[in-house]
Amino acid sequence: MSWGTELWDQYETISLHTQKGIDFLEKYGHFIRDRCAIEMEYAGKLRRLVKNYQPKKKDEEDYQYSPCRAFKHVMTEINDLAGQHEVIAENLQSNVIREVSILVKDFKEERKKHLQEGARMMANLSAQINSLDRARKNYEKAFKEAERALDNFQRADADLNLSRAEVEKQRMNMTIKSQQCEETKNEYANQLQKTNDLQNQHYHTMMPDVFHQLQELDEKRIKNIKNFMIQSVDIERNVFPIISKCLDGIVRASEQINEKEDTLMVIERYKSGFQPPEDFPFEDLSAIKSGEVPAPINTVAITSIRPEAMTIKGTMSAGKIKKRVGIFGIFSSNKEDYSDLPPNQRKKKLQLRVEDIMAKIQQETAARDGLMKMKGVYEQNPALGDPMSIEGQLNESGHKLDKLRLELQKYQGYLEEAIEGINNKSGQQSVVLSVSPSAPSRRNKGTAPGHHLNGGHLHRHHRNSGGSGGEEDSLSRSASDSSVSNPTVNHKQSAPGTPLPSHGSSNSPESGLGTSHTSLPDSDPEHGDSDAQGHPGSDYCDGEVLPALGICKALYPFEATSEGSIPMQDGEELHIIELDQGDGWTRVRRQIDMEEGFVPTSYIECTLFNSC
C-alpha cells in the first residue's frame, strides 16, 4: 500500500499528518528530557538524604552496633542507587534526547523540501490547466466567429442585390475566421495534449514519488520512536544488575544485624567491672545492748548522706560527681591514663588511644621516608634542590617520632596495667608490695582516688568518745602532710581495677614514698620519728599493736602478690587499723593470726566504730 496510489488526492491531509507526526516526536523528546530531570532530581535528593543521615562525630560510638552499622551500609547502597539514576539520566540525555533533537530537525527540513516539490508540481499542473482553458476559450471564440463569417458569406452570396465585391469581402472574412478557428483548434488540441500528459505524470509519477518520500519519512519517524522507547528501556535495564546488587547489599547488611552480639557489645561498652553491693545487715539492738556484739554499730550508709558519692564512674550519672577540693586537689588526675573510668572502660579507651598513636607513627614514618627519598634525589641531582633544606624537616619528623614512641610506650604500659587488673577475678587493683613484712610502709597519699571510701561502702558510726576521734583526725592530717611534703611523689591517679606500675611507682604500697605516720614507726626512716609539724612522733612505738578503728568485710577475694599486702577471702572479716588516705588502700589486721597488711578499699565494705 502506497500513499501515492491510495492517497493521490490527499496532499493537504498528508501534509498535516506528517506535521503532527514530527510534533509528536518532538513531544516525546521533551518527555525524555523531563524524565531525565526527574531522575537527576531524584538522585540528588537521595544523595542529600544520605548526607543528612550520615552519623555525626558525636554518634560514632553508637554506630558500633549492628543495626547502626547495617543502616550505614544501607545509606552507602542508597548512594550507589542514586548514582545509577544519574547514569540513566546521562545515557538518556546522550543517546535519546540528542538523537531525537537531530531527527526532529532533519525531518522538518526533509518534509519541507518534499512539500515544496509537491507544491511546485501542483503549480505546474495548475498553470497547464489554465493554459488549456485559455486555449479552449480561444478556440470557442474563433469557432463562433468562423460560423458567423460563414453565415454572413452565405447570406451575401444569396443576396442578388449585393455587389460582387461585397460578396468577395464576406468570403475573405470567412476564410480568415476559418483559419483562425483552425489555429485555435490546433492550439487547444496541443494544450490539451500537454495538459493530459502533465496531469498523467503528476498523478501517476511525480506526486506519488513525493507522497512516497513523505511516507518513508513518516515511517522512519515511527520506527525511530519505537527504537527510542526500546533504547530507553535498555538504558534502564542495563543498570538493573547494579541496582540488584545494591538491594542485595542492603539485604546482606540487614542479615548482619545480630541482637545477641549487640547485647554483648552493650555489656562490653558499659560494664564497669564492679560487683553489686551486698544486702544491708540486720542490726539487733537488743543483742547490741546486751553486749553480745563487740560494739554498737550504726549502719548509716554513705549513700543516705551523700547519694552522689556512691555513683559509679562510667555510668549515666557520672557527670554529676564533683571533684574533691582542698588538699586532695593536688592529686587530681589529668585523665591521660583514663584512671577515672571503670576497669573495662579504661581498657577500651587505652586500646583506642594506642591504635591512634600507632596510626600516627605509621603516618609520620611514611612522611619521614618520603623526606629521605627527596633528600637522596637532591643529593644525586643538586639542581633539583638543596639537600640541607630537608634536614630541618627530618629533624622535626624525628622529634615527632620520638615523642610518639614515648607516648606509645607510656600508653602501652597503661594498657598492660589495665589488662592485668581486669584479669583479676573482681576486676579491681592488684598492687604488689615490696617492703619488709615487719614494717609495711603506708602508700603515697592521694595516688589512687579510684579506691576512695565510697568504693568500699563505708559505714561510719558515732560514739560519744572524743579522744579517739581526735587521734583519727591527727592521723589523717599527718598522712596528708607527709605526702605533700614529698615532692618526688607521682600524683597520677588510677581507676579501680587498674594495676599500678610495679617498678618503684609511688602509687603502690611498696614504693615507700610519702609514708603515713599511722604506719609503723620504722616504715619511714626520714619522717618516722616526727609528725607533720616536725614534733617527735609519740603515737605508737615499735611492736605496739595499732588499735582497731572498725571492721571490714571482704566483698571479693584478693590475692597478695608481694610483700606489704595480705590476701583475703570473699566474706572474710578483718579489723581496720588505718583508714584509706584517698589512695584506694586500707590497712587491715586479720583477727586470727594478727597478720597486718594493705587491701584495696574497693574490695571491702567498711563499718567504723562510733568513736571514729
Image (tube, grey):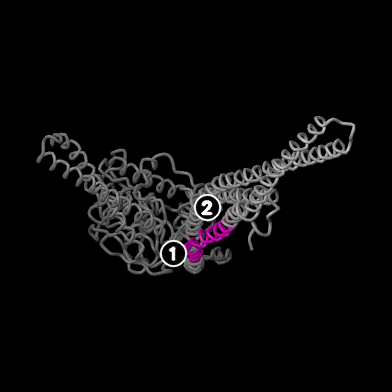
Looking at numbered disc 1 in the image, what kind of residue is underneath it? Lys
Looking at numbered disc 2 in the image, what kind of residue is underneath it? Val
Q: Position of residue 453 (x, y in %)?
A: 44, 53
Q: Looking at the rendering, in which quadrant would you find the N terminus? A: bottom right
355 and 389: which is toward the camera: 389
Find residue 553 and name its label. 1
Q: Residue 214 vs residue 253: left or right?
A: right
Report if residue 62 is visible in the image. no
Find residue 370 and name its label. none
Q: Position of residue 43 (x, y in %)?
A: 53, 51
| Residue for point 58% across, 63% down | 285
Give neighbour class at mark 1: few <14, some 14-19, many 20+ (Cα, 10 Å): many
| Residue for point 58% across, 53% down | 213
Give neighbour class at mark 2: few <14, some 14-19, many 20+ (Cα, 10 Å): many
Find residue 96 and name its label. 2
Q: Looking at the magenta stretch, what is its main secondary structure?
A: helix
490 and 562: which is toward the camera: 490
Q: Residue 122 vs residue 552: left or right?
A: right
Give the SS element for disc 2. helix
Q: Is residue 394 magenta?
A: no
Q: Is residue 223 magenta?
A: yes
Residue segment shown in magenta: 221-248
Please say if 430 is above or below 123.
Answer: below
490 and 356: which is toward the camera: 356
Q: Position of residue 542 (x, y in %)?
A: 26, 54
Q: Nearer the viewer's eye, disc 2 or disc 1? A: 2
Report if residue 201 is visible in the image. yes
